Image (cartoon, rainbow, N blue to C red):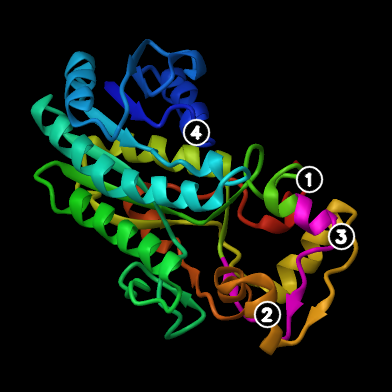
Amino acid sequence: MRVLVAGATGVVGHPLVGALRARGHEVSALVRDASRAPEADRVVVADALDREAVLSAVSAARPEVVVHQLTALRLLRDDPPEAFAQTARLRTEGTAHLVEAARAAGARRLVAQSIAFAAAPQGPPVLDEDAPLYVDAPDPGWAATVRAVAELERLVSGSDLAGTVLRYGTLYGPGTGYARDGGTGLRVLAGKLPLPEGGAGITSFLHVDDAVQAAVAAVAAVESEATGCFHVTDDDPAPAAQWLPHYARTLGAPPPRALPAALAPRLLGWFLTHQLTTARGATNARARTALGWKPLRPSWRDELGRE
């Protein structure tokens, strides 16, 4: 099939281009900077926030399937506020442009990246895709992120294309924040990520390679009825009290120091406190059934911090 990957320079998009080509697909890489493009059958250049440019680029590629992997999270290390603001625009404006362009080009399916950790912290420790999103989070930044996620999912699922939303878990592996040289890895190595009292927040991890394979499976399902939102996570959701000390040991870092819960928001910020104390995990049962996908790395315990 002819597949267009938008966001082909990203931590998932770059290896996804190669994985799709290895399966015989004709792949177009949509990028903003041609010098950073992966090897592909075709490279098309457009800023995803420029409607006319996106319409022209997608039209030139004539894809049967469009895969949306657009984020600006590579900016996190240098300018976190700008990274989140740009990513929110890509999830709203950029998604709207891709939906319109895919429809105009005659595509049959749109596969889009979302996140599995945007649920409101209510109900059981591990949630399915029907749990409400945390659109009214008390932190304005996180609320804006979740609202952008909700809009992406509305645009993709509500289009007349066959829309599939892959809600990735917390990514680890090469190029992610949890790699040894990533932002979280460096913070843990420096002993600067304490563990708030209890450490009850649940994280569902996902290796980058498994994220790629889930996208490949979603593309292959073009003729199926596998539409809607799917949690794409490993099989081992875990509280911070388990994964953070394990991660530190694997990195050879000092054990995370204990932090009184009352001090956590001031010292860690709202989101990290939420992640480590109140966040819910995500079950991947629906993706296994509908997409025929399963993680090749079923637990973060084997490789988190080793790459």
Q: Nearer the viewer, mark 4 or mark 2?
A: 2
Q: CA distance from mark 2 to mark 1?
A: 27 Å
Q: CA distance from mark 2 to mark 3?
A: 22 Å
Residue that label 4 marks: 10
Placement of 124 over or under 113, stated as above or below: below
Q: CA distance from mark 3 to mark 4?
A: 28 Å
Mark identifier at residue 306:
1
- Element on which disc 2 rests: helix
Q: Nearer the viewer, mark 2 or mark 3?
A: 2
Judge from the rendering whether residue 209 lies leftward or rightward of residue 253; answer left or right.
Answer: left
- Element on which disc 3 rests: helix
First in sequence: mark 2 vs mark 1: 2
Q: Nearer the viewer, mark 2 or mark 1?
A: 2
Q: Quadrant of residue 176?
A: top right
Q: Give, as a three-letter code, the residue at label 3.
A: Arg
Q: Give, as a three-letter code, the residue at label 1.
A: Arg
Placement of 126 over or under 229, stated as above or below: below
First in sequence: mark 4 vs mark 1: 4
The question of residue 202 being in magenta is answered with yes
Q: Residue at x 58, y 71 (%)?
A: 275
Q: Is residue 278 visible?
A: yes
Residue 16 screen position, x and y as percent: 46, 30
Q: Residue at x 42, y 18 (%)?
A: 21
Mark identifier at residue 264:
2
Q: Please name whichever residue, 91 or 89, is drawn nearer the observer in this view of the structure.
A: 89
Judge from the rendering whether residue 279 lies leftward or rightward of residue 292; answer left or right.
Answer: right
The crowding category of the residue bearing disc 4, from other C-alpha atoms within 10 Å (few below 14, some 14 to 19, many at least 20), is many
The crowding category of the residue bearing disc 1, from other C-alpha atoms within 10 Å (few below 14, some 14 to 19, many at least 20), is some
Q: Give, as a three-letter code, the residue at label 2.
A: Ala
Residue that label 3 marks: 249
Q: CA distance from mark 1 to mark 3?
A: 10 Å
- Residues rendered magenta in the picture: 186-203
